[in-house]
Image: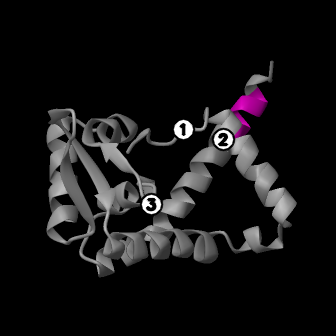
Amino acid sequence: MITKDLQDQLSLTLLRASLKGKYGMTALAEANDITLMQAMSLCLLEPGAGVRMSALGNYLSCDPSSVTGIVERLVTLKLIERKEYETDRRIKLISLTETGLRLREELLRVMTEKRFPALDTLSPEEVNEFIRLINKATDGASLPATT
């Protein structure tokens, strides 16, 4: 069990890292005529995998109408595509297009290179351990893919 002071320090560190990364995406999102929430949604999609719109909404803590607005804009810009799920037409799957994949890569690159340059000082082993610990702490919190 960790102390309250250590828990507070951890919470503040996570918040600072989140805000710092978010700030790095803002200018690139605006340059591509998308909102920060649309940019974050794009980044959450895994290449080559379809994700249910409802899963994206749950992950972002958005209501269905907000997710629809996010997805509509990204579809209009041809950054993602939306399809009906094969076995249940009520379920909508979204996935990255080639254009969306390129923008996602750029958003992720800008977020880490510009906002977290000290990550370059970590060895590959340290980066792997860092990722492992974050995944452990967040239960590997990623969007469940449906292919």
Contact between marks 1 and 2 (CB within 8 A): the answer is: yes
Q: Quadrant of residue 2?
A: top right
Label annotation for residue 141: 1
Residue depicted at x 54% and y 62%: 21
Residue depicted at x 42% and y 58%: 48
Residue depicted at x 66% and y 69%: 116
Residue kind at label 2, given as amino acid type:
Asn
In the depicted structure, whether residue 85 falls above or below residue 109: above
Residue 130 horizontal/vertical position (percent): 76, 51
Magenta stretch encompasses residue 8: yes
Residue depth check, mark 3 versus mark 1: number of the one nearer the observer: 3
Q: Earlier in the sequence, mark 2 or mark 3?
A: 3
Label annotation for residue 135: 2
Quadrant where the N terminus is found in the figure: top right
Q: Earlier in the sequence, mark 1 or mark 2?
A: 2
Q: From mark 1 to mark 2, how far is it between C-alphas?
A: 7 Å
Furthest residue toward front:
87
Residue kind at label 3, given as amino acid type:
Pro
* Segment tinted magenta in the rendering: 5-10
Apparent side of residue 60 relative to residue 77 in the rendered image (left or right) = right
Quadrant where the C terminus is found in the figure: top left
Magenta stretch encompasses residue 4: no
